[in-house]
Structure formats: structure tokens, C-alpha cells
Amino acid sequence: MNAGTVVLKVGQAVLAPLIALAFAVVVTSVIVSVAGSSVSEFWEVMLEPPSKRSWVNILNQTSMLFLAGMAAAIAFRMNLFNIGIEGQYLLASYCAAVVAGAALLPGKLNVAAAVVVAMVVGAVWAGIAGVLKVTRGVSEVISTIMLNAIALTLVGWLLNQYGDSAGQGRRTTPIPESSRLDGFSFFGYFAQADGRVWTLSFVAIVVGVVLAVVINRTRFGFDLRATGSNDEAAVASGVGIKKMVVVAMLLSGGVAGLIWLPAFFGDGYYYGTPFQSNLGFTGLAVALLGRNRPIGVAVGALLFAWLSVQANPLQLFADISPSIVQVTQGVVVLAVVAAYEVVRRFGVAQEQRSIRKALQRTGRLEEGAAT
Amino acid sequence: MKRTARFAAVGVIAALALTGCGKNDDDGDDNENGADANASVCESADGDGPAIGLAYDVGGRGDQSFNDSAYAGLENAVEEYDATCVEGEATDGEAESAREDRLRNMADQGLNPIIGVGFAYSESVNAVAPDFPDISFAVIDGFDPDTEPNDNVAYLGFAEEQGSFLVGVAAALKTETDQLGFVGGVHNDLIKKFEAGFVAGATAVNPDIKVAVNYIEESDLAGFNDPEGGNQAATALYEGGADIVYHASGASGSGVFEAAATADAWAIGVDSDQYLTAPADQQEHILTSMLKRVDVATFNMVESVVDGEPLTSYVVYDLSQDGVGYSTSGGFIDDITTDIDEYADQIISGEIQVPTAP
């Protein structure tokens, strides 16, 4: 790989998201102005330097979106479309909350137990789709959508049946004080009223590093990538596809199970109204934005977290519905895929041109030698 | 890679589209809001009375139900006390921290009182209120999630079962098939109160009446913002023989009214007088509405702050103080209002105890 291709590769990785982002900015601005609101006020609110409190929220949201994005990315790398992350982390969060609320183990051991439970439940729920795919040929897209609906209804029913009554709703038993995690204030940088960066946010970093190593540096990761890019070739070189599908789904579901746990131990303390839904679906978009690479997913998660947190006071300060950023997020995802394709084609054309040049040169040399 | 990307893109769009089914309607509303945003009293109010913060539940102003009722109370308060106001809107599936941030932004602006519309604000108010002891907070339908009482928070609840009982009486007196239906948005304890009251009212008139029950969602709050789901749930009930369907499903109710118009049957509205906001072709199918006077509670909260004696702790609005009731717009039940009011008197006197759970 010469210097030129390195520049090209880097350019490709950076240029495409930038084009996509610019495109999304334009589209959002047009929509804001068509809706009769002030475009400048909109961007003023969105781009205002976040307050300390907003930074805490952005970091916390980023950690959850990163986990969701990585859960999606593992499956994507294997050409599997795990649309069921939503249901996996919903069910996992509920089960973890029940186990942690029962406080079978003292203090922080309780946290560890809940983490294990969440990963196992998430993995099993995703594993169902994996097993169905390899044994009965059921598309994982369909089965995971169905499993989402089942998880949602199941959790609702369990909560209504066995949850504690609290006000007008139900919730799981709150976890004991000793199992709550204080979070990071970064040596007092964030005051009490700013909130805390959740302790389990660091799990996102651990997961990112571990997965980067597993995917890029292990036999398993190689098999995963090989199957993802060309399954026939992978089979020919001795990869057991069926096993890979199930393992990839288990891994994806296991990571999905972790998504809500930072919030649970840092702020929520029980499953009920504090539960944040929709992270699973957003995770798919984040993975796509980050091209399934841990660094890319982290950037994508940060961008989405920034957008949603900064949009929150839109109605207060600019009288614009905060739902507008969902449009921005959607356009970014659409545009990024298109932009990658454009940049890739440009790259391919560039490469062909240089090959042609090289061939012409050698051709002339050969002609010279013949005469 | 290229194939993966393309495949994934299609999938993600499908996912967004699928999850967005409910949201599309929401966005439609938002656009409408954008168009007549000037209609909000907060745009023009510039009096020197109290500055009120109103944080809406999902659906926001324009849901023609719960949130709009709170807005009506806000409007009255602005007019009465020369107040100013700031509105905050919730998005579907938002983070707990988003609600908290919304309330803190309002408190930082010095608004007082700050009212959270809907029980989803219970936790966030509990987190924010202790940091602002001089500001009075209220949560409609709310509760205190922990054991430490907050002396600057009021939890404004309603005796929904009593109002539902009365529309149950109305339905029982008007039904021809002796079969009624109930559509709930989400199968939680709050909506079960509506169901319990409605069934109790209907069977108090005629014990032989059957009430079929259909919930849109088991626990997903999207059930309050899903007109298509409301339509399907109600259609199933009408096809099952019910000739009057009562809904407690927030913005999903517009689907219930559509189903009523299609089946040429009756529907009963909820929270606000929904005859007034329904399209003309559906109006003639709205028998009555159970009124949950969120507007009264909102107004009272502001009034109490103006009077210097802010409401605190749990306050229940029931029949005796007109906190719940029924509407007569359209004139479809004018012939039976004396019967209904008799039941109302019995509830107020305590002769009839309305159950709060089915």
C-alpha cells in the first residue's frame, strides 16, 4: 500500500461522513424553514456549547448508543441484520432489574450478577433468531422483529403481573442503596446538580476494546469478517457457517443486554418509567454511520447523543419541536450510505486510472524491448 | 462491503419506518402545531403575573385530549393572572435525563410554578425539586417515587373511575345490544381505573350488560399515540357486537372515532370534550366524553401559587369538586342527564363506592 492509497483510504473514511453531515444540515435547515421556524435560532440552540449538565447527558447517552451500535456492528460484520436489539435489551434490562431488585447478593456483587444476567438474557433472546436461521432457514430480520414484539408484550405482562405498584404504574423493586453506583464527577468538575457520568459507562469502553481485538486480531474475528464478505469462500476455507451465525447472534445479543445497565445502576434503580426505549433501533443507525468499526461507532454515537441532548430545549428557546432532530438523524444515515458509495466509486476509478497508467508504461517498455 | 452497506441501509430505513409508524402521525401533529404555533398563548403573553412552566407528555399540545386539557388550564391562568408561560415538549422514547433537563431549564429561567403533565414526570420532578426549594412543582397523575416527601411538589390525581362510571351509566342507558366495549391505550393501573369505573357504571344500570375490553399495548406508552391501533381495537369490538365503545387511549382515540363512524356506532371520548375537536363526520358518533379536568387542576395549581399557598402533596380531583365529569355536547344524552346526575349524587354522598381496579 503506497502513500497515495493511504491518503485515499483516510480521505474515504473521513470525507464520506462529512459530505453526509453537510447534506443533513442542508435538509434539516430546509425543513425547519418550511415549518415556519427560524433556521438561525435552530442552529444557535443546536451548536451552543453544551452546559456541564448537557455534557454529562451527552456522555451518558453516548455510552448507551455505543453499546447499541456495537451490538448491531457485530452482526453486520457477519452480514446478519440483528433488528432485534430493541427486544433483547428490553428483556435483558427487565430481567437484570428483577434480579438486582431481589438483592440476592450484597452490594456491588449484585451489580456483577445483574450484568451477567443481562448478557445471558440478551444472548439467549438473540440466539433464538440465530438458531432459527441455521436450522430452519428463517430470515433473522423477520424473526428478530417478531421477537421484539414478543419481548415488549412479555415484559409488559410480567410487570403488570408481578411488578410493585407505584403511583399510577408498575415498576420492579428498587435496588438497595448499597448496589447503586455513584458515577464519576471527574474530581468535582461536575457539580451535584449537573448529574454524574454513570459508572458503568466505562463498560462501553471495555466492550469497544475487547470487540476491536476480537474482530481484528483473533481467528474468530477473521472467520467472522471472512464470512461477512464472502460466505462461499469462507466455507471453502473451512469456516463452519452455522456455528458462526449462532455465535455472532449470541455475541450481538450479549452486548445488547448491557445497553441500559449504566442508566439502571446510575440513575434509574428500577425498571419502569425511567427505562429508555428505542436505543436498539438507533443503534442500527449508529453502526451504519460508523461503518461497523469501534472508533466509527463511537463517533456516530457521540453525534447522535449530541443531537438528541442539544435538541431537548429547542421548544423552550426557539419554539421548535425537538422531534426535528429525528429527521436530521435519518438523513445522516441515508446520506452516509450514499456518500460512501460515491467516494468508493471515485476511489475505484482513481485506482483503475493509475493501473492503466502503469500498464501503459510497462507496455511501452515492452514495445521498446521488442524493437 | 458494498452489499452489506446497501442491505443494511434498506434495513435501517425499514426499521426506522416501522418504528416510526406511530411517530408519523405525531410529526403530522407537530407540523400542524408549527403552522398554528402562534395560537399558543405563550407566544403573546407578556403580563407581569406568574411565569408558568408547562412540560407536556408525549403527544404534546394538539393531542386533543390530555395535553390539550392542561393547555386549556394554562390559557385560563394566563388570562386570569396576567401570567406568562413557557411550554416544553416531550419526544417519544426520550431519556429520563431529557425530562429532568427540561425541568431544570425551566427552573433556571425562574418559572414558578412548573407543571409536569403526566405520570412520566414523577421521577424527574423528584430529582429536580429538592434543588429548587423556592419553586413549586406539580405532576399531573404523579406520585412520589421514594420515601422522602418533597414539600414543594403537588401530585394532582383524579378520580377517573367516578367519571368513567357516569359515562358507563350513559352507555348502559343508550345501548341497544347490551354489549359495550372499552379500548385502553396501555394496560397499566391508571387505565384500568377507567375500565373499572366504566364497567361498574354500566352494570349498575343493568347487570346483564357485557363489556368487552381491548388494550392497544401491554406496556409500551406508544399505545397513547397510535390512532391505527385504536382503530383496529375498536373495530374488533364493534364487530364483536358492541354498539358503544369508550376509549381511554389519549391521541389513539381519533382512530376509535374513525372506527365508530365506519361501523355507524357510538363512541365515548375521554379527558376533554372530544365532540368539540372531532371532524364533522365523526361528531355525530360521539355520545359523550368523560371529562378529566386537567385544566381545573392546572389552573388551581397556578392559583394556589398566586395566593401564596402552593398546593403540596397528594391532591385528588373527584366528582365533588368537578374534577371529573361528563360532557353533553351534541345533545345525544340530554334525555338521560337526570338519571346520570342521580348516580353522581350517590357517588358524592358515598352511597356508591366505585372500584378502582377491574
Image: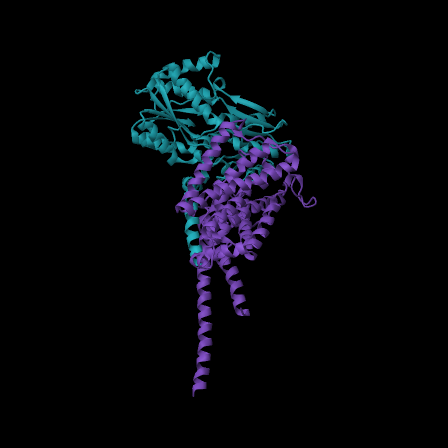
Q: Is residue B127 above or below residue B9?
A: above
Point out residue B177 in the picture as x, y percentages from the top left corner.
Answer: 30, 20
Of B349 and A224, the residue lying toward us: A224
Q: Provide the letter of the chain coloured cyan.
A: B
**Coordinates of residue B39 in the picture (x, y in percent):** 45, 37
Extreme residue in the right direction: A187
Q: Position of residue B200 (x, y in %)?
A: 42, 18
Which residue reaches farthest front? A238
Q: Is residue A290 above or below residue A91?
A: below
Q: How many marks?
A: 0
Q: Nearer the viewer, residue A319 or B64?
A: B64
Is residue A365 among the parts visible in the rendering? Answer: yes
**Quadrant location of the C terminus of chain A?**
bottom left
Q: How is the image coloured?
A: by chain
Q: Quick check: A11 left or right of B151? A: left
Residue B122 x, y percent position in the rendering: 56, 31
Left or right of A260? Residue B25 is left
State whether residue A126 is above or below residue B336: below
Residue drawn where x is 38% and y is 35% of the image: B229
Pick whichever, B326 or A288, lies toward us. A288
Is residue B59 visible in the rendered image? The answer is no
Up-down: is A51 above or below B355?
below
- Comparing B293 with A88, the one in front is A88
User: Farthest bottom residue?
Assistant: A371
Q: Which chain is purple?
A: A
Q: Left of B235 or right of it: where is B22?
A: right
